[in-house]
Amino acid sequence: MTTRFIALAGLAAATALAGCNDPGFRGVPEVRIATSAEVMQCRMTSTITNEPGLYGPLVGHEAERYARNKILDMAKGDGANTVVFDPVIPGEPVYQLSAKAYRC
């Protein structure tokens, strides 16, 4: 029992340290989230999809937030400064996120 706890504590510590530089955890303030109406005068740079990878009531929301942040980071890498996410059904598990990246 103790060994398992130490291993999990070590994994949690390593994840926390790695998260300091991971945009999935820290976010991407250089890229904003907008609606379709807000990007009508912008140039689309790419379409990006990502899967949260974890599901369920305890980790599903955090995994979705991480996946959204990774999309924002990929959009930044494509030269975009604005992202429009495709809608998801509230309360339903999200198995795939899709977004369009724009330069405004």
Image: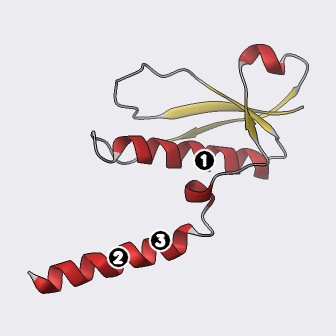
Q: Earlier in the sequence, mark 2 or mark 1?
A: 2
Q: Position of residue 98 (x, y in %)?
A: 57, 31
Q: Position of residue 2 (x, y in %)?
A: 13, 85
On residue 11, the disc is: 2
Q: Residue at x 43, y 47 (%)?
A: 62
Q: To which residue does mark 3 refer? A: 16
Q: To which residue does mark 1 refer? A: 69
Q: Residue at x 41, y 21 (%)?
A: 90
Please state, as top left, top right, bottom left or bottom right, where the C terminus lies in the image.
top right
Q: Secondary structure at mark 1?
A: helix
Q: Is residue 51 visible?
A: no
Q: Secondary structure at mark 3?
A: helix
Q: Earlier in the sequence, mark 3 or mark 2?
A: 2
Judge by depth and name the residue closer to the eye, 4 or 99. 4
Quadrant for residue 19, please give it.
bottom right
Could you give the CA–CA distance between mark 1 and mark 3, rounded to whole angstroms? 16 Å
Q: Residue at x 59, y 69 (%)?
A: 20
Q: Earlier in the sequence, mark 1 or mark 3?
A: 3
Q: Position of residue 92 (x, y in %)?
A: 34, 24
At label 1, the amino acid type is: Asn
Q: Farthest residue to the top: give it.
A: 37
40 is higher (above) or lower (below) than 103 = above
53 is higher (above) or lower (below) than 41 = below
86 is higher (above) or lower (below) than 80 = above
Please state, as top left, top right, bottom left or bottom right, where the N terminus lies in the image.
bottom left
Q: Circles 3 and 2: CB distance less than 8 Å?
A: no
Could you give the CA–CA distance between mark 3 and mark 2, rounded to whole angstroms? 9 Å
**Apparent side of residue 85 relative to residue 75 in the rendered image (left or right):** left
Quadrant for residue 37, please give it.
top right
Q: How many marks?
A: 3
